[in-house]
Image (tube, grey):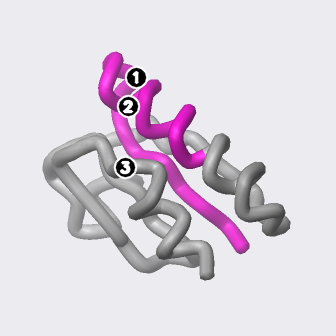
Amino acid sequence: MKIQVMGPGCPKCAKTEQIVKEAVAEAAVTAEVVKVSDFQEIASFGVFTTPAVAIDGEVKIAGKVPSKNEVLSWLK
């Protein structure tokens, strides 16, 4: 599983990355968490508001920080 956390490095983006990593650890799944800060790469997902999270190339959320429960539901 590849999870991409997209954003330029703002506090909300950092919080999103932290929540995703905590959820991955809690769910005990094997996942590679990658930070994407290149705007062209982010736009290639069709994302224009950050933070955003994509799992295996599918955008799950954009423009807000997800809750840990939301992330856990995506990992199942």
Q: Amino acid at mark 1?
A: Gly
As displayed, is residue 25 above or below residue 19?
below
Is 1 in front, or is 46?
1
Image quarter where the C terminus lies is bottom right
Q: Which residue is mark 1?
A: 9
Instruction: Using the image, tell me which numbered label, if any, was put on residue 67.
Output: 3
For residue 7, say whether it is visible: yes
Q: Hey, which quadrant is residue 3 in on the image?
A: bottom right
Looking at the image, residue 2 sits to the left or right of residue 15; the answer is: right
Q: Amino acid at mark 3?
A: Ser
* Cβ–Cβ under 8 Å for marks 2 and 1: yes
Residue 13 is marked as 2
Give the residue type that dot 2 points to: Cys
The residues tagged by marks 2 and 3 sit, at their Cα atoms, a distance apart of: 13 Å
- Whether the magenta-drawn stretch holds residue 23 is answered as no
Mark 3: few/some/many CA within 10 Å (<14, 14-19, 20+): few
Q: Position of residue 42 (x, y in %)?
A: 34, 53
Q: Which residues are magenta?
A: 1-20
Q: Which quadrant of the structure image shows residue 12? A: top left
* Mark 1 → mark 3, Cα distance in angstroms: 18 Å
Left or right of 48 in this view: 44: right
